Image (cartoon, rainbow, N blue to C red):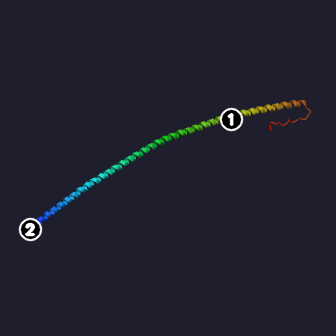
Amino acid sequence: MKKASVITAVGLALVAAFCLNCQAENVAGKITALEKQSVRVKAQIDQAKKGTQDRMTQQIRSINQSVQNLVKQRTQLDSQIARMEGQVASFKTSSQAKLDAQVKSYQQQMSQIKSHIGKLAAQKAAKAQKSVAPQAAKAPTAAPVAPAPDPAKK
């Protein structure tokens, strides 16, 4: 019985070894499959990271280009604003100079007209004085006569 027990024990050991070997092969196959799956997942992660990085880099380039364009436009607009402000200042100065010249011209004309009116008034007064003097010499006894009102004065 010892032989049978030993043979049974050896048989059981062989069966157990065979089962463990199958189990080990099965586990090794699962490990290999999981390692392959791990490599695929890592490749997917790397691809996703690269895609995200590329998209982010492209967006950053696009935004930087937009910023540069806006800065360029702002510079151009600042230049145009400065030029227009200069034109406004020039126009104000020019307009004020023209206005001053016109006012001066009108004042000179007004001065000439007043001078001419003064001369005409003096001539009229002299004529009136001359006409009153001969009448006073002709009629010393008569009462002085007031001159008739001038219809042009009214």
Query: Residue 27: x, y in percent?
Result: 21, 59
79 lies left or right of 20: right
The amino acid type of the residue labelled 2 equals: Ala
Query: Residue 150: x, y in percent?
Result: 82, 36
Compared with 21, 2 (above or below) is below
- Which image quarter holds the N terminus? bottom left
The tag on residue 106 is: 1
Compared with 55, 139 (above or below) is above
Compared with 109, 23 (above or below) is below
Local secondary structure at mark 1? helix
- The picture quadrant where one finds residue 153 is top right
Local secondary structure at mark 2? helix
Which residue is pictured at 11% across the width and 66% down the height? 9
The tag on residue 4 is: 2
How packed mark 1 is, by other alpha carbons closer than 10 Å (few <14, some 14-19, many 20 or more), is: few
Which residue is pictured at 20% across the width and 59% down the height? 26
The answer to whether the residues at label 2 and label 1 have Cβ atoms under 8 Å apart is: no
Of residues 7 and 65, the one nearer the viewer is: 7
First along the sequence among labels 2 and 1: 2
How packed mark 2 is, by other alpha carbons closer than 10 Å (few <14, some 14-19, many 20 or more), is: few
23 lies left or right of 67: left
Which residue is pictured at 28% across the width and 53% down the height? 40
Query: Residue 137: x, y in percent?
Result: 89, 30
Query: Residue 76: x, y in percent?
Result: 48, 40
118 lies left or right of 100: right
- The picture quadrant where one finds residue 138 is top right
The amino acid type of the residue labelled 1 equals: Tyr
- Which image quarter holds the C terminus? top right
Q: Tell me the distance, in whole angstroms, between the alpha carbons under discs 2 and 1.
A: 148 Å
In this view, the mark in front (2 or 1): 2
The tag on residue 84 is: none
Which residue is pictured at 64% across the width and 36% down the height? 100
